[in-house]
Amino acid sequence: MKQWFRTVLAGALLAGSLAVSAAAADYTSCADHLKDLGLFQGTAQGYELDRAPTRGEAAAMLVRLLGEEQNALALDYSAPFTDLQNWEKPYVQYLYDMGATTGVSETTFAPEEPCTAQMYAAFVLRALGYTEADGDFTYAGVDDFAQQIGLYDAAVIDTEDFLRDDVVAASYTALSLMPKDSEQTLLDQLVANGAVDAQAAEPYQALFDLYAQYRTATADMAAFEQFSVRGGTEAVLSGKGTSSLTVRTEDYITVNRVDGTATATGKITMEAPSVDAYTQPYSMDAAEETGSMRAALLYGYDVVPLACVDTVKRSGSDWTFSFAELPAQYKGCFWALSQSGAALESAEDIVLAQTVQSGRIAFQTLRLKLMQGDAEFQVTLTGELKEAR
């Protein structure tokens, strides 16, 4: 198949212009949103989203997320931890006073140690008013509870390789959540307390409100434990207005949320002028895949995570989302294009439309355009979801 592509692309003089590129982070837009709201600063080297956060950094990021940095900086340090740098002390002191952290021992906080997904979830949940003492969650099961209340999304947060990228995605999502026993979102509370400018917050509040309606409309997806998806991809590559390559897949995917498995079978067909058409069956198993391929099989047809959304619109039972970047869980859906060297990170005009019926996603269509030089890929991905029987 790769030889077939090389022949076609060489004939079309497109091989050089469609080089694969790699993205450093998936949720840069979340960092941008937090920065717009005055809740995230990054480091002297920029956002640095592609590395693990330290516990000291996570403490500072959480205090800023809560809009309490100035109050923290005014505190006198009295916490029992003896291993903190001066810049870390105000943030840890604030979290210690509010009961969001107890350190790793009676006298150490371990600020230079990596902050895991488990640690950050516990930090945020305690800041939102949830506690182990009240039986809201256990530290051992904190990741599951974070998913249950919507703080962590399995399609977004990598709990095994937790990076600053995951931190900003979770932090941005936290703004849309209501703290325990509250009828306001965290962002609403920050605006009411004067920690976030009301005008800056207004578009995010509107987005969060509409997104909450979407989550309500798709509430039954959580119980949609076993389902199948029938659909496929069609991508047409053209250069200077002339169609030169068409890639199609016909896919049948089965997903089992009970045991976290997914498989896909189908066929791929490729056609180009002056070259014999190529057709080949394929099969994939999420257990044998990693990264975007595994994410696509498990989460490519699911509720759209807030961390990915640029805009959302509703018309009756139809929901339309636009994305600033192609979300990670959809990149693997276009595995057939990777053989051509198409750079998915260059995707433009990314729009996902979902039809929601009886609390579930019934059908979705994802469209995007890939532009590099004179080459253009027009891509459509469709899928119809049905409960497995």
Image: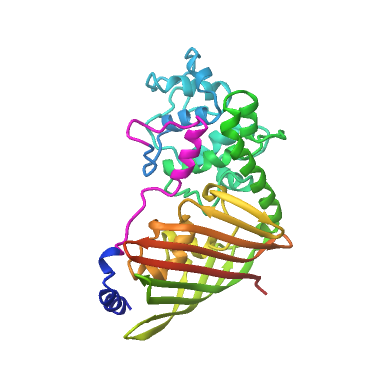
Provide residue 60's location: percent of width, then percent of height: 46, 28
Front residue of 186 and 287: 186
Outermost residue on the right side: it is 358
Provide residue 205's location: percent of width, then percent of height: 63, 38
From this view, report whether residue 114 is shown above or below residue 73. Answer: below
Q: How many labels does the image show?
A: 0
Front residue of 59 and 67: 67
Lateral position of residue 97 relative to residue 178, left or right: left
At 32% from the left edge and 57% from the top edge, which residue is drawn? 21
Provide residue 174's location: percent of width, then percent of height: 58, 39
Residue 332 is inside the magenta segment: no
**In which quadrant of the rendered view does residue 281 lie?**
bottom left
**Where, quadrant-wise, is the N terminus in this rendering?**
bottom left
From this view, report whether residue 63 is shown above or below residue 245. Answer: above
Lateral position of residue 222 relative to residue 31, left or right: right
Outermost residue on the top side: it is 76
Lateral position of residue 268 relative to residue 194, left or right: left
**Where, quadrant-wise, is the C terminus in this rendering?**
bottom right
* Residue 126 seen by the camera: yes
Residue 33 is inside the magenta segment: yes
Provide residue 163's location: percent of width, then percent of height: 42, 43
Front residue of 58 and 186: 186
* Residue 104 seen by the camera: no
Highlighted range, magenta: 18-46
At 60% from the left edge and 51% from the top edge, which residue is drawn? 312
Front residue of 373 and 46: 373
Outermost residue on the front side: it is 241
**In which quadrant of the rendered view does residue 317 lie?**
bottom right
At 39% from the left edge and 21% from the top edge, which residue is drawn? 87
> How was the colour assigned to the protein in this rendering?
rainbow
The majority secondary structure of the magenta stretch comes to loop
From this view, report whether residue 11 is shown above or below residue 321. Answer: below
